Image (tube, rainbow, N blue to C red):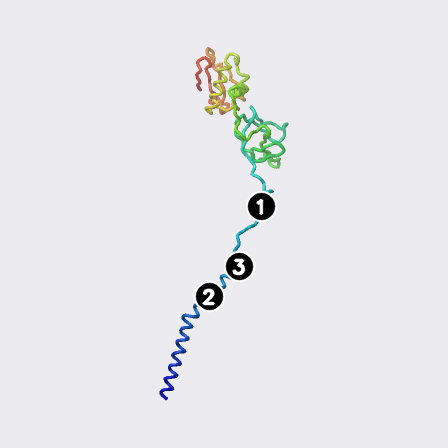
Amino acid sequence: MKKVLMILILLLGVGGAGAGYYLFYMKPAQDAAEQGVTKKKKKPVLPNTSTEQPDETAEAEVNTHFYVNEHKLAIRNAPDPESFPVRYLYKGDPVTVLEQKQGWGRISRYFVYQQGGPEIAEWVAMDQLSEQVPVISKEEREEILMSYINKSDDLLMYKEKFIQITGQLIDEQMCVPEDFDELKGWVRSVRYQERHVYFIYCGGLKSVDKIYFDADSGEIFY
């Protein structure tokens, strides 16, 4: 009887050892092997070999920055050469074009003068603009300045001095070309009867906006 019990115990021990070996050694190895096979069976991710080209019909970027390329450019309240000129730009002035329409460029927002009225904006002719800053020679600069002051008093006597002082005031940003357009040049001052003094309005048309120029001494005063 004792021998039978010992044999049973021995068999159980062998069975337990076998089960332990399977659980702790063989099964983990089988699981790892199966996972490796599963990973190998996964479809590899291929690189994108699409030959699709970018949309060539996409709108190209439109340049909006220009410069006046004429001595004097009219700004009109409609894209029409017969439209009233509201003001002027001058050669080299920068311009931002917000919209192009049939050879015209809109340089302001739309606005309405009166309720129910039409929308109006400021327009310039595109063929008088350049994408590059215009190069102005010394001779052309004198010609441009002369066009600003060609109706100055005593012009023949002081032409060179008027051109020089006009250019100086514009370069120093004390005046702009449009200031000279108001009076078409330098005006002889009646206040200084015994001197050759001339004046121009810069920045307004009040007495405080007057700039005086003594053509004999070259003095500028206010």
Q: Residues within 10 Å of mark 1 (few under 14, many from 20)?
A: few
- Classify the position of the C terminus by image quarter: top left
User: 95 or 61, which lies in front?
Assistant: 61
Q: Earlier in the sequence, mark 2 or mark 1?
A: 2
Q: Which corner quadrant holds the N terminus?
A: bottom left
Q: Nearer the viewer, residue 14 or 167?
A: 14
Q: Residue furthest bottom?
A: 1
Q: Nearer the viewer, mark 2 or mark 1?
A: 2
| Distance of label 2 from label 3 (alpha carbons) | 18 Å
**In the rendering, at what x and y percent does residue 32 appear?**
45, 65
Amino acid bearing label 2: Ala
Question: Disc 2 designates what residue?
Answer: 33
Q: Element at badge 2?
A: helix
- At mark 3, the secondary structure is loop
Q: Which mark is residue 43?
A: 3
Q: Badge 2 local density, few (<14 within 10 Å), some, or many (20+)?
A: few
Q: Is residue 13 left or right of residue 105?
A: left
Amino acid of disc 3: Lys
- Towards the viewer: 134 or 111: 134
Between label 1 and label 3, give the one nearer the viewer: 3
**In the picture provided, is 18 more to the left or to the right than 200?**
left
Q: Going from the N terminus, do you reach mark 1 or mark 3 first?
A: 3
Residue 73 place in picture, x, y as percent: 57, 26
* In the rendered image, the vertical position of residue 71 relative to residue 215, given as above or below: below
Label number found at residue 53: 1
User: How far is the residue under mark 1 from the one under mark 3?
Assistant: 27 Å
Badge 2 vs badge 1, beta-carbon distance below 8 Å: no
Percent of width and height locating residue 172: 45, 24
Image position of 46 with respect to 176: above or below: below
What's the CA distance linking mark 2 and mark 1?
45 Å
